[in-house]
Image (cartoon, grey):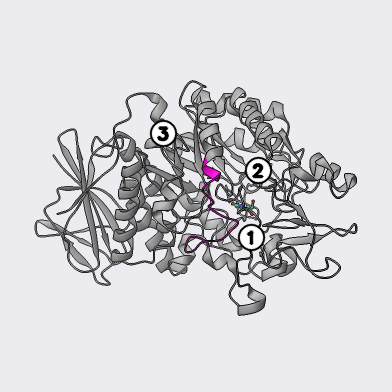
Amino acid sequence: MTETTNPAPPAADADWWRSAVVYQVYVRSFADADGDGVGDLRGIRERLPYLRDLGVDALWLTPFYTSPQVDAGYDVADYRDVDPLFGTLTDFDAMITDAHALGLRIIVDLVPNHTSSAHPWFQAALAAGPGSPERELYLFADGKGEHGELPPNDWESIFGGPAWTRLPDGQWYLHLFDPAQPDLNWRHPRVRAEFEGVLRFWLDRGVDGFRIDVAHGMIKAEGLPDVGFSSMTTGQRQSELLGKGRLPYFDQDEVHEIYRAWRPILDSYPGGRMAVAEAWAETPQRLARYIGPDELHQAFSFDFLDATWSADSFRKVIDTALAESTIVGAPTTWVLSNHDRQRHVTRYGDGEIGLRRARAAALLMLALPGCAYVYQGEELGLPEVLDLPDELRQDPAFLRTGESRDGCRVPIPWSGELAPYGFGPEGSELSWLPAPATWRALSVAAQTGVAGSTLELYRAALRIRHEHPALAGTTGGVTWLEGGPGMLAFSRTGGGTTLTCVVNISGAPALVEGYGRPLAASEDLTEQGSGHLLAVDAAAWFERR
Ligand code: NOJ
């Protein structure tokens, strides 16, 4: 048996984030109160009781700020206002008041690496021309070549193509994403001051935390050196190094200064305000540098999301994540899906197999110590929508790379017989992406109260996670148990009880015995002798007192 421990116990409520379950609300696809086919803040407010009953602790809301919506709101034109598409600041205030009254915390998305090209700063920089102080807020540069006709370096946009766009006045500007998302110059004090003000603006409005977009990207290597290869030269895209290699525009040491300046701001507010980094680094060790008592509270562990459906693969990423976070005194975060990645039902094989595995993965994730992020719709077992017609796809990456993230962003089915299944107000037929006919059976209404449904499985697991002394808090270790090849089994203890989670990835039904009585299972368990038969690709929780 091997033991891996998570860091010191939370004493007060201020440490709520250490063991929370955070539900990611992809705002434009959650619930549409005004009937325009796009989700909004009023829609979220109306559905808060659903989330309370589901049993999550907090919501992370994707960007709802003023934006031309070139990259679904990750192109912000005004960081201190709500886009009319999603409502008003008054709607935000009403939503957060209701959420808090229901015991739900609110985390908002902060997008500091780049603004929208419609942001007044960028517009002023365009108008002011080369050499102006306005241009210093972004990364403008002269091109190479005799007439500056070549980009300043070989950097590539994550969305494909060069990361530089040339203006009619001859200068180029950097955009690591879409040309409508110019990168800010984080070595400029005005940029730093502005974002500290934005943090305070939302903290003053009561938010409990921030999800930091591209948290590894704000500082670029001095002199903007070439990467040395590009898709043009080798066919390998630079973005393939994300999470695997070094790039001069990501994970520069100086970026940590920014977070060391932010942490005292967060700590100066009561109630445990937190921040979670969307960061990609070469190694888990470098990723762990974003978290700790003087920087951010958490960083998403995408290795868990990327783990293949095998016991070894899961065990390896779990051990590494627990060990790294223990060193820096922060909890681990677990995530299976988000708005950028193919939904895990589909990643694990799609159809019935994918759903079985996704349900088992939910029990695995929710039994681990630390904080879990649930992406909206995973509690319904939604698969990726693979057959969206090209003309409906809206992801800006689609045109440049042919890869599209729209299939995981289709609006949630709530109820009814016809698409969009209660996404909008009664009778509304609009939804910005169409839901497939198969989603009628997956709606919240269709699954509520139905024994064995994925929704009821999540509800039961979340209730047990909250109540069970062995799963409470972040203390205690994960004790691995030898269950044979392809069996993933670990236990946690607390309050005089032991909870064991077993996942069967062995390819054949497996007899599980000696762990006590079953508390939850992703597929029906069959009693056999003194134990239980756990089906293929299924997981179960057992309790022994
Ligand atoms: C990460 C976000 O999750 C993604 O949706 C967005 O396109 C990029 N950052 C750029 O902001």
The answer to whether 421 is drawn above or below residue 291 in the figure is below
Residue 7 position, x and y percent, is: 30, 38
**Secondary structure under the numbered disc 2 in the rendered image:** loop
Residue corresponding to mark 3: 293
- Asked if residue 502 is positioned above or below residue 391 in the image, the reply reads above
Disc 3 under 8 Å from ligand 1? The reply is no
Is label 1 or label 3 in front? 3
Question: Looking at the figure, which quarter contains the N terminus?
Answer: bottom left
Who's the residue at 72% across and 43% down the image? Answer: 76
Q: Amino acid at mark 1?
A: Asp
In reply to whether residue 251 is colored magenta, the answer given is yes
Residues at discs 3 and 2 in contact (Cβ within 8 Å): no
Label whose residue precedes the other's in the sequence (3 or 2): 2
Tell me where residue 269 appears, x and y as whole percent. 52, 22
Q: Quadrant of residue 195?
A: top right
Residue that badge 2 annotates: 186
**Of residues 200 and 57, the one drawn nearer to the viewer in this rendering:** 200
Which quadrant of the structure image shows residue 156? Answer: bottom right
The local crowd at label 2, few if under 14, some if 14 to 19, many if 20 or more residues have their Cα within 10 Å, is: many
Q: Which residues are magenta?
A: 242-256
N-term mark: 1 or 3: 3
- The picture places residue 183, in percent across and down from the top left corner, at 70, 50
Which-is-in-front pick, marks 3 and 2? 2
Main SS type for the magenta part?
A: loop
In the image, 206: left or right of 166?
left
| Pointer 1 residue Cβ closer than 8 Å to ligand 1 | no
- Tell whether 119 sits left or right of 206: right
Secondary structure under tag 3 reads loop
Which residue does the numbered mark 1 point to in the structure image?
406
